[in-house]
Amino acid sequence: MTFEQFLQYIFSGITSGSVYALTAMGFTLVFNATQIINFSQGQLVMLGGMIAVGLYGAGAPLWGAFLGAVAIVVLVTVGFERVAIRPLLRKGVLAQVIATVGASFVFETAAMLIWGRDAVTLPAFSGEEPLSVGGATVVPQTLWVVGLTIVIVVALQLFYRKSLFGKAVRACAVDATSARLQGISYSRVVIFSFALTGAISAAAGVMITPISFMGFHSGSLLGLKGFAAAMLGGIGNPVGAVLGGFILGIVEALGVGVVSAGYKDAIAFVILLLVLFVRPVGLLGTKMVNRQ
Amino acid sequence: MVAYLRRHAAYLVFAVIVMTIPAYLSDSYYLSVLAFMATKFMMALGLSLLLGQAGQISLGQAGFVGIGAYGAAILTTRLGWDPWLAMGTAALVSATIAGLVGMPALRLKGYYLAMATLGVNEIIYILLIQLKGLTNGTDGISGIPPLSIGGLSLSGPRAYHLVVWGVALLMLRFSLNLSNSRVGRSLRALHRSEPAAKSLGVDTSYRKVQVFMLAAVFASIAGSFDAYYVRFISPESYTITFSIILITGVIIGGLRTVWGAMWGTLVIVILPELLKRVNDDITNLVFGVLLVAIMVLWQGRTRGLWQMVREWRLRSGPGGPGPPGAEE
């Protein structure tokens, strides 16, 4: 592998790593608010991409399609929280797993019925002219993806650390009962976390669609990889989620260079299984993960 | 004798009905639906023991079905093995893989076990596509021989029906006996509370791996049967989607008893056949809605559809509130 090739793989790894990081962030937000792993997380990313393509095809400008997709996915997640999650809070892990798995089926099949079976794409946000960096080529969309991811992550951190409501959300993540005793509305925190997850997931989906196409079936793989990233970084830890996402993206991209492109998707699962079996708390995690 | 008949009445009636179906049904479409029902029933039985009795979720059963199917196909078409021997070998391979995966995976609970089994399914699926020299990749394997007994080919739908349902009934008998045995009770005990079961002397990790391997063997045998029946296999039959459909069936059927697997199988076989007439693509949508609706309406209790209807009728009847459902 020459240095140029190595750099090329790193760039491609950072790009897909951004999407994994945002997907992992979606898992983390919901997990911290509800202790639920949302198995339909990847499908929310897929919905974001598909809705944006649909809106763009209907004549909306690119930025309008982006915002429209984010708004619609937020509505979907809020509705999902109302209908399926709220009745199942504290009702046992099995019920929650199965309900969110069912939701993933609903989102996926609905997308297939609405937009068909073909993978679709969006034009890049600002031109297709590749840039040359240190001998490797980078499409401008990569800069958008990485840039927006950094903006979203920083904004989230500021929100959680500086704003009062952000602190309330963090309090609920530590101990929901004590938080409620302090007068924090738990149900508002939960619904807010779901809405935020929907927004971040949709944004991730729209950003990646110009680079790597989006089909109704893309969600399950994205979701599993996002979960692998969240577990790698330490579930419940937002910094870990971002770190895990980028590590996973880069390892995967290098794996393509070293092993073979056909096994690209298997890498994430091998990492996931290794983390689950060897160090379930992940790189940065401290929480015990063997809750019943 | 009478006591024996009474105790096993449900099983015997079911067995007689199933085994006499070919005597008065000759329509090849219905017979093929029934043939697939038999193998789905085997998969559901294993999953019912794992999820219903032991409370361990697996979202990766389709992976073991795939190993069963590919093991059977590869050993018969490439090496010319006897189909039954190939089926048994594939089941052994599945059991071994289940054991190796299960030992670390079953230490995990709830979400993590679900994700780990999902990951295993996805890795098996990727291997089926990528190991082209062995599996022929996405093109799949064709020309798989049919089953035969002592030189008598079982390619006819009626003969096949008797064999595949015969095996399914044996598995049902085995599962019923298991659930009524000390092992079954220890599985239900660890379902309710693992520390409690442990303190009463149940080797919970051993039992969990055991039932996980058993479910994998059932799935693998079912996969082999399907391969010999259809004579062609390709990787897309063994995706996570199929694993989730199996889970749907077991849950709709009810997790309390092994019989739930039968009701669940009926639903996941017949519902798609009916929905096909409306629109082929809405099947998964309906399954998804069912999964969410069942969980929300049942609040995580492990009753089946029929038990729920019965309790609802009891409650709305003059008898006042019905008996409380088993809580998780």
Image (tube, grey):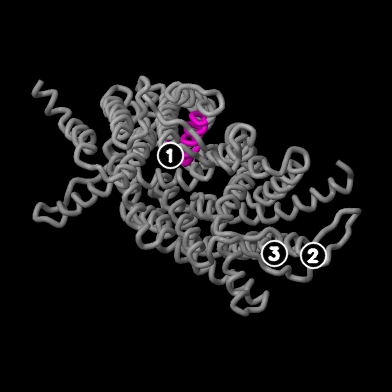
Residue highlighted by disc 3: A210
Camera-nearest residue between A236 and A76:
A76
From the image, which quarter does the N terminus of chain A lie in? top right
Is disc 1 on the same chain as disc 3? no
Marks 2 and 3 close (CB-CB < 8 Å): no
* Mark 3 element type: helix
- Residues at marks 2 and 3, CA–CA distance in whole angstroms: 11 Å
From the image, which quarter does the C terminus of chain A lie in? top left
Camera-nearest residue between A77 and B170:
B170
On residue A140, the disc is 2
Residue type at mark 1 is Val
Of badges 3 and 1, the one in the foreground is: 1
Residue type at mark 3 is Pro
On the rendered structure, is B142 left or right of B168?
right
Q: Residue at x 53, y 27 (%)?
A: B97
Does residue A168 appear in this view? no
Q: How many marks?
A: 3
Magenta region, residue range: B56-73
Residue B70: image location, x then y, percent: 52, 33
Residue B96: image location, x then y, percent: 51, 24
Q: Main secondary structure of the magenta part?
A: helix
Camera-nearest residue between B53 and A110:
A110
Q: Residue at x 51, y 62 (%)?
A: A112
Of badges 2 and 1, the one in the foreground is: 1
Q: Residue at x 44, y 25 (%)?
A: B83
- Residues at marks 2 and 1, CA–CA distance in whole angstroms: 49 Å
* Mark 1 element type: helix
Q: Please tell me how crowded label 2 is: few (under 14), some (14-19), or many (20+) other residues with Cα within 10 Å.
A: some
Q: Is A11 a magenta residue?
A: no
Q: Earlier in the sequence, mark 2 or mark 3?
A: 2
Residue highlighted by disc 1: B230
Label 1: chain?
A: B
